[in-house]
Image (cartoon, helix red, strand yellow):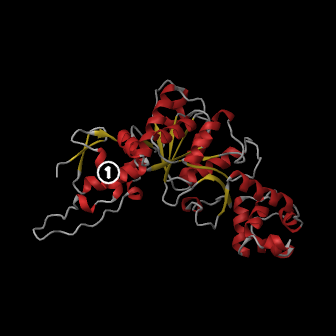
């Protein structure tokens, strides 16, 4: 037991394993006692004073002795290359901490980045050709604009959302309704690996937790909680995606919906959302405009020259990354895909560099996100 006290993470894991303890209950206990270790050191009388904690939960905490399972969880995480983040870890997503019942622990395969600007895209598991195409195109454009796409790695729209972001060499996050070691659905194994290599696969559930039906509403609150807004593409009137949309509203997030054909069952849910006030999405600009205050990029202040004109940096003052992008461009317009391919840079970085070059007068943007180099 002395060894357990040397590692606070073990106490977080142990408290997470207490049966019947909700995320809100976990938060209340830690709020009262300061950290999970002190929760286990507290007396029965003191534990019983904490709001929302049942007598059976108090008993489970006081009598907890399954430290072998805790050690096994830590060992499995190390072997699988999985990080376990507590709610107090600097890498724990700040947006997620703002929801009422944030998960106390996150299992992460891949990497979460503090500067991720996130939008969730969800929808029907039985997606139509229109829904799949629209989702992939939308998420490709979101990734081109530096947005990290969040979804649930389910069949249909979720999988299309991840594929679209990956096609643009962008980042994407998959939130699972099972243990992080379980690929569900199994045919998405290659997608799972691609997401982990270009973003993160995330779960709040311990290893080997099966994908039970009751886990997915819990998963949905994390999808919306991680995101600035939620886009719903194709949803029947009883779709789980509508639950995600409702959770997003409860969490103060923006809700968007892609319209479909009036005779398609998959349009019923999205059209209902639009009637109730969700923003209709025809293209990526509809999302970016709504989220603009949270997406704005601070521009470097330029010092005017003596004649009052802006002091535009010359080629010799450019960063190496800017020079690399500039070398790809010619007097003929080049599309973003080609620039990404030739430089090997991430889509998010390329778009940021292009913006800087355009603002400083080195390049010009043409229709279709194509760029050409200006003569010096």
Residue 343 in the image: x percent, y percent? 38, 46
Most distant residue in the top direction: 263
Q: Image quadrant of residue 311?
A: bottom left
Residue 70 vertical placement versus 232 (above, below): below
Q: Is residue 344 left or right of residue 207?
A: left
Q: Is mark 1 on a helix, strand or loop?
A: helix
Residue 53 in the image: x percent, y percent? 78, 65
Mark 1 burial class by Cα count in 10 Å: few <14, some 14-19, many 20+: many
Residue 100 vertical placement versus 173 (above, below): below
Residue occupying the point 38% across, 49% down: 350
Depth order, front residue of 79/316: 316
Q: In this view, does 234 lie to the left or right of 22?
A: left
| Viewer can see residue 274 | no
Q: Is residue 321 left or right of residue 64?
A: left
Q: In this view, does 231 lie to the left or right of 76?
A: left
Number of marks drawn: 1
Residue occupying the point 47% across, 38% down: 167
Q: Image quadrant of residue 366?
A: top left
Most distant residue in the left direction: 307
- Image quadrant in which the N terminus is located: bottom right
Residue occupying the point 50% across, 26% down: 129
Residue 363 in the image: x percent, y percent? 24, 49
Depth order, front residue of 255/211: 211
| Viewer can see residue 122 | yes
Q: Image quadrant of residue 330?
A: top left
Which residue is under mark 1?
Answer: 354
């Amino acid at each position: 037991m002395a060894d357990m006290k040397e590692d606070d993470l073990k106490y977080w894991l142990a408290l997470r394993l207490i049966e019947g303890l909700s995320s809100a209950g976990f938060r209340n206990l830690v709020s009262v006692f300061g950290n999970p270790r002190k929760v286990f050191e507290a007396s029965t009388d003191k534990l019983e004073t904490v709001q929302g904690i049942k007598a059976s939960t108090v008993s489970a905490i006081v009598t907890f002795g399954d430290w072998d399972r805790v050690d096994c969880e830590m060992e499995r995480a190390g072997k699988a290359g999985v990080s376990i983040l507590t709610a107090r870890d600097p890498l724990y997503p700040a947006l997620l901490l703002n929801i009422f019942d944030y998960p106390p622990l996150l299992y992460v395969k891949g990497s979460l980045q503090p500067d991720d600007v996130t939008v969730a895209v969800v929808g029907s598991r039985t997606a139509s050709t229109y829904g799949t195409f629209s989702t992939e195109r939308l998420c490709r454009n979101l990734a081109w604009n530096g947005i990290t796409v969040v979804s649930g790695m389910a069949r249909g729209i979720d999988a299309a959302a991840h594929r679209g972001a990956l096609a643009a060499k962008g980042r994407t996050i998959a939130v699972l309704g099972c243990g992080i070691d379980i690929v569900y659905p199994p045919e998405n194994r290659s997608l799972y690996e691609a997401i982990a290599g270009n973003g993160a696969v995330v779960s709040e559930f311990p290893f080997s937790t099966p994908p039970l039906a009751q886990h997915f509403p819990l998963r949905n609150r994390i999808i919306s909680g991680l995101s600035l807004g939620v886009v719903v593409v194709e949803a029947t009137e009883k779709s789980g995606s509508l639950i995600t949309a409702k959770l997003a509203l409860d969490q103060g997030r923006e809700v968007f919906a892609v319209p479909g054909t009036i005779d398609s069952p998959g349009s019923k849910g999205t059209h209902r959302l639009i009637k109730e006030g969700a923003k209709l999405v025809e293209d990526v600009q509809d999302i970016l405009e709504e989220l603009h205050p949270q997406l704005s990029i601070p521009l470097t202040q330029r010092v005017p020259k003596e004649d009052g004109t802006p002091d535009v940096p010359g080629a010799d003052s450019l960063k190496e990354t800017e020079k690399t992008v500039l070398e790809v461009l010619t007097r003929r317009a080049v599309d973003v895909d080609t620039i990404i391919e030739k430089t090997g840079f991430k889509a998010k970085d390329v778009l940021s560099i292009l913006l800087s070059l355009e603002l400083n007068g080195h390049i010009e943007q043409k229709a279709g996100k194509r760029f050409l180099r200006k003569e010096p």
